[in-house]
Image (cartoon, helix red, strand yellow):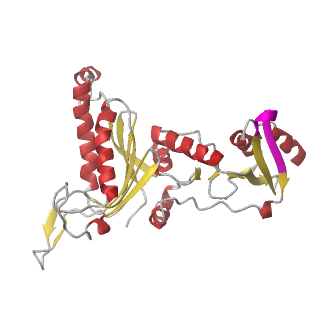
């Protein structure tokens, strides 16, 4: 069996194609880079959004740029097997070497976003989200939400698309088919996203594969100081997300978009009430009791909102 599998892998065009061949016969198959930091558990090219497609292509390119021979590992007929694989353009196939699985590096955790990102993935574990490749991107979670929106794990609570008015009749779409009116709809959609961010204590955002993190506890710790945005100095990541939101207005109006925003809400809205014992202390009038995580996806002229059903907090 091993000899036959080696021949099939050698006939593949490159490491990704060899992985596709391997997954057809092996359980728990994984393609690992020589360092172990980059890996694939599924074909990265199967995506549901523009952001996911870009992130997967970027991960694939980074994988091929890493020097050395890729590693395949999995279980075939109950036995763990492993191979070193490297594309060989000269012979229109791959060089394949059968190796001892015990000598291969274990796949890394893929947490390029650091410890905060690791804690978030732990909190989102009830969803059943299983990353397909590493480094783990926010776009992967967005694709999971799109694919799972018909299940109990995720609830899609809003969808705003280019040239779609609020009227429930097809004929009224002509009223927002021009760019100026489509831009007005896009601005309203992005404004709704920004308004909800005001109720989040922790925000992750990703555009073109770049991840930024905004922790409101850190933001409020800044010393007030004159700045172009007013009387406070904010972190660079806040400015980055502000720019991304601004760019997304025109992109949505044009039928494009590449932005994923994940927020952990502490309140349903920004209404405040005074503390009964100390009127100078304000509390949220409608605190979030369950399912605090919400994800927004700006993609192909649509702004979609997903409530992640992780349970009570």
Report the front residue among 80 and 59: 59
Magenta range: 88-97
**In the image, what residue occupies the spot 22% across and 62% down?**
286
Instruction: Locate residue 23, reporting x and y percent.
Output: 72, 45
The quadrant of the image that shows the C terminus is bottom left
Which residue: 28% across, 65% down?
219
Residue 151 makes an appearance in the image: no
Q: Is residue 106 left or right of residue 211?
A: right
Give left or right: position of 227 versus 216. left
Picture residue at 68% right of the left edge, 42% below the top: 16
Q: Is residue 66 visible?
A: yes
Q: Residue furthest left?
A: 279
Residue 82 falls in which quadrant of the image?
A: bottom right
Q: Is residue 292 magenta?
A: no
- Looking at the image, residue 87 lies above or below residue 289: above
**282 over 264 or under it: above or below:** below
């Amino acid at each position: 069996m091993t000899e036959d599998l080696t021949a099939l892998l050698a006939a593949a065009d490159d490491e990704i194609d060899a992985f596709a061949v391997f997954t057809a016969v092996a359980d728990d198959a994984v393609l690992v880079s020589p360092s172990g930091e980059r890996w694939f558990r599924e074909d990265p090219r199967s995506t549901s959004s523009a952001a996911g497609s870009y992130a997967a292509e970027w991960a694939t390119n980074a994988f091929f740029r890493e020097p050395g021979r890729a590693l395949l590992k999995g279980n075939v007929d109950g036995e763990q097997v492993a191979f070193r694989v490297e594309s060989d353009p000269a012979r229109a196939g791959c060089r394949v070497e059968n190796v001892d699985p015990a000598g291969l590096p274990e796949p890394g955790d893929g947490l390029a976003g650091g410890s905060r990102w690791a804690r978030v993935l732990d909190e989102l574990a009830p969803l059943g989200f299983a990353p397909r490749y590493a480094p783990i991107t926010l776009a992967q979670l967005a694709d999971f939400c799109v694919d799972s929106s018909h299940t109990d794990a995720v609830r899609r609570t809003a969808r705003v698309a280019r040239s779609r008015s609020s009227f429930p009749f097809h004929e009224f779409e002509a009223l927002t088919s021009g760019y100026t009116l489509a831009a007005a709809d896009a601005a309203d959609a992005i404004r709704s996203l920004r308004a909800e961010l005001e109720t989040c204590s922790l925000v992750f955002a990703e555009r073109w594969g770049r991840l930024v993190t905004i922790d409101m506890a850190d933001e409020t710790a800044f010393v007030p100081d004159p700045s172009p945005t007013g009387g406070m100095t904010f972190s660079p990541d806040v400015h980055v997300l502000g720019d991304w939101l601004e760019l997304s207005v025109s992109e949505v109006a044009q039928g494009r978009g590449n932005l994923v925003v994940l927020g952990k809400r502490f309140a349903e809205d920004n209404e405040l009430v005074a503390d009964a014992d100390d009127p100078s202390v304000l509390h949220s009038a409608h605190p979030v009791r369950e399912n605090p995580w919400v994800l927004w996806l700006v993609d192909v002229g649509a702004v979609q909102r997903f409530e992640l059903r992780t349970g009570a907090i």
